[in-house]
């Protein structure tokens, strides 16, 4: 569904990505992890077609990503970035409607309006629909942006494969909403959708993802699927800190504890 071959990215003489090759499948929730500056966001932007690699190639739906018309690509994949600064008054509903822009010319259809309403409701933000987006808390704004990207790739029958890119989708949310949103994302990935996200919390990543890819200094160091045994020595190499492995008593998924002395 999405394939990366020998991708590199160089800017200002600095190589941010080094010979990255990966394959991604539909119905898969993949998390990319690593220290700050590891190349995670750069990789995500290249996978989404928002950034052109200086070497290698990206293929999506068996076509090179640069061959897609921008509007057509926007109908097939949506991107949640880390920051969205809006310098003018705009309602929550209008923000989420931005996700539907690739689907209509001038005026949204009844279907577009219904999809936006459903996406807002899905995020538990219906009572904020007419609220000025700029008055929201960080967590509220993050849920609105999630509603926007969901509305962008919304389809009732899930017949067409789509891709959702998420850069730190739960960073501003409290524990309750972190788990609620990630559970929703996990369920969404089973509906003919590939989800690729950057998450910094290793316990959340292993609780919900099908696969976790670790990066360091622009390279992929290791990839674990949900059934593989985990080598904590690899995690120590990546994060430069002692990490112990235990089991979540509620889900039997791996959990990690940091040695702080």
Image: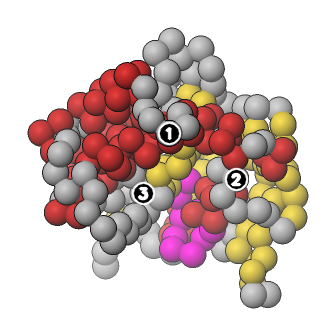
Q: Say if mark 2 contacts mark 1, CB within 8 Å.
A: no
- Residue 112's image quarter? top left
Q: Quadrant of the C terminus?
A: bottom left
Instruction: Verify whether residue 34 appears in magenta.
Output: yes
The one nearer the camera, 208 or 136, is 136
Magenta residues span 29-40
Residue holding disc 3: 168
Q: Quadrant of the N terminus?
A: top right
- Total marks placed: 3
- Seen at 51% across and 74% down, the residue is 36
Residue 11: in magenta span: no
Q: Distance between the residues labelled 2 and 1?
A: 25 Å
Q: Left or right? Give the position of 52 relative to 166.
A: right
Observer-nearest of 144 and 199? 144
What mark, if any, has residue 106 been given in the picture? 1
Q: Name the residue under label 2.
A: 49
Q: In this view, does 6 lie above or below 15?
A: above
Mark 2 → mark 3, Cα distance in angstroms = 18 Å
Task: Give the alpha-carbon distance from disc 1 to disc 3, as whole Å.
Answer: 32 Å
Which residue shows up at 50% across the image and 39% down it? 106
């Amino acid at each position: 569904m999405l394939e990366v071959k020998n991708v590199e990215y160089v800017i200002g003489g600095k190589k941010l990505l080094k010979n990255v090759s990966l394959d991604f499948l539909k119905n898969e929730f993949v998390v990319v992890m690593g220290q700050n500056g590891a190349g995670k966001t750069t990789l995500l932007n290249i996978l989404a077609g928002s950034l052109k690699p200086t070497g290698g190639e990206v293929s999506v739906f068996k076509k090179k990503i640069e061959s897609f018309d921008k509007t057509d690509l926007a109908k097939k994949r949506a991107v949640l970035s880390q920051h969205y600064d809006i310098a003018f008054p705009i309602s929550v509903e209008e923000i989420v409607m931005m996700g539907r822009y690739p689907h209509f010319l001038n005026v949204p259809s009844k279907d577009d309006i219904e999809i936006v309403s459903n996406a807002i409701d899905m995020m538990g933000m219906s009572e904020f629909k007419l609220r000025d987006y700029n008055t929201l808390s960080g967590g509220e704004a993050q849920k609105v942006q999630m509603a926007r990207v969901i509305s962008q790739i919304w389809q009732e029958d899930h017949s067409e494969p789509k891709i959702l890119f998420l850069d730190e989708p739960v960073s501003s949310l409290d524990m309750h909403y972190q788990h609620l949103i990630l559970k929703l994302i996990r369920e969404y990935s089973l509906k003919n959708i590939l989800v690729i996200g950057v998450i910094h919390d290793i316990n959340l990543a292993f609780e919900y993802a099908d696969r976790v890819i670790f990066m360091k200094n622009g390279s992929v160091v290791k990839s674990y699927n949900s059934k593989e045994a985990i080598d904590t020595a690899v995690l120590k190499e990546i994060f430069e800190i002692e990490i112990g492995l235990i089991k979540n008593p509620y889900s039997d998924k791996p959990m990690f504890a940091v040695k702080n002395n």
